[in-house]
Amino acid sequence: MMPESELQDLIIDLRSATLGVGTYTCEYDHLQELTGHIADKVIQGNPTEH
């Protein structure tokens, strides 16, 4: 499981690691309180910048 904001670069990393043939599917599971570095980015208005 990973936050939705982390999914944007996942396909790039996955394809790089699998010689361009990797795929993934995404499915909503649950809501959870956001804390730490990612929460700080959301508060600043930049949730996708790491």
Image (cartoon, helix red, strand yellow):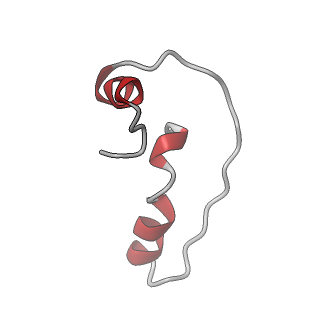
Residue 33 x/y as whole percent: 50, 15
Position above or below: 27 against 40: below
The quarter holding residue 13 reads bottom left
From the top left corner, tell me how far across and down residue 41 is, in percent: 34, 31
| Nearest the eye: 40 or 18 | 40
Residue at 49% in and 42% down:
5
Find residue 37 and report its image quarter: top left
Q: Nearer the viewer, residue 17 or 7?
A: 7
Instruction: Inspect this view and state whether residue 1 appears.
Output: no
Q: Quadrant of the C terminus?
A: top left
Q: Is residue 16 left or right of residue 50?
A: right
Q: Is residue 25 left or right of residue 10?
A: right
Residue 26 position within the rendered picture, expressed as x and y whole percent measured from the top left: 66, 50
Side of 41 where 27 appears, left or right: right
Can residue 17 be seen in the rendering of this structure? yes
Residue occupying image coordinates x 55% and y 81%: 21
Q: Residue at x 61, y 61 (%)?
A: 24
Tell me the residue at 44%/69% (across/down). Answer: 12
